[in-house]
Image (cartoon, helix red, strand yellow):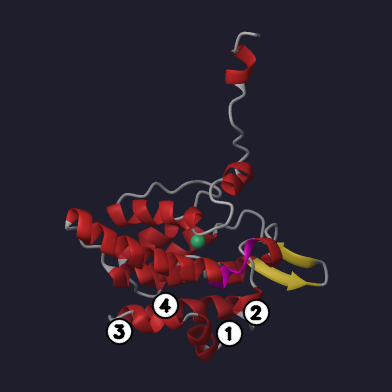
Amino acid sequence: MLTTEHVLEVFPGIDAITDRRLRQLSLDVWRYVSERNPTWSDIGRIPLHPTMPIATHGTLIAHVAAMARLAETLASLYRELWAQDLDLDTFRAAAYVHDAAKVIEFTDGPAGLQAIAGYNHAIEAGRIVRELGGPEAIAHMAEAHSFSGPLVMPRTRDAQLFLLMDPMCLNVVFERHLKANGWEPPPTLERYRPAR
Ligand SMILES: [Fe+2]
C-alpha cells in the first residue's frame, strides 16, 4: 500500500496547492489507485512505462514533479507576456493525479514489470477524478493528457496546454509516443527527391 505520508514525502509540492479540496483530491487519487493495486509501497520504483527503464528515463516521480514545475514556469510566463492567468492549483492538482492510474496499470512480479494490455491510464485518471467528486476541468485535463493510445481531444485551453506539457517532461519528448502509436515519419521526401 502507498501511505499518505509516503505520497506527501515524494510529492512535497502537493502542500503548495492552496485549495484544500484539490490538495485532498491529489491524495485521494493515490489512495484510490493503491487500494486497487496494493502491491506498490514505493512510488520511487515506478517507471514511466515498463518499456522505459528508470535508469534511462527516470522515475514517474521526476516526471510528475516536472509537470508541476513546468506549470509554475508557464504560469508566470503567461501572466507576464499575455496578462493571462493559469490557475496554478488546477495545474498542480492535474499534475499530481494525471499518471496515478499507472499504479493500477503496472504490476511488478516474478516475470518483471508488466502493464495491463489496453489499459488507458489517462482515461482512467479522468474517471477516478470524477468518481471522487473532483472538478470536471481537472478530470478532462487528466483524460486528455496523453499521446499514447487513442487521443482524447482536449476541449479546453488548460487541457490543450497540459497535453503538450506531458511529453516535454520526458527525456525523449515526442519520439517515444510516435513509436508507441506506430507513426513513423513518411519516407516520401527521400523517395521522390531527384538523384544528384
Ligand atoms: Fe504524464
Residue at the spot x=40%, y=70% of the render?
A: 129
Q: Which residue is mark 2?
A: 40
Image quarter for residue 49?
Answer: bottom right
Q: Which residue is mark 3?
A: 20
Please identify the dominant SS of the magenta region.
Answer: helix
Quadrant location of the N terminus?
Answer: bottom right
Q: Which residue is mark 4?
A: 26
Residue 14, given in percent of the width and then of the height, sits at: 40, 80
Magenta-tinted stretch: 57-61
Whether residue 111 is in magenta: the answer is: no
Query: Which amino acid, mark 2?
Result: Trp
**Can residue 70 be seen here?**
yes
- The reply to whether dot 3 and dot 4 touch (C-beta < 8 Å) is no
Give the mark nearer the N terminus: 2 vs 3: 3
Residue at the spot x=77%, y=72% of the render?
A: 109
Q: CA distance from mark 1 to mark 3?
A: 21 Å
Residue at the spot x=32%, y=60% of the render?
A: 74
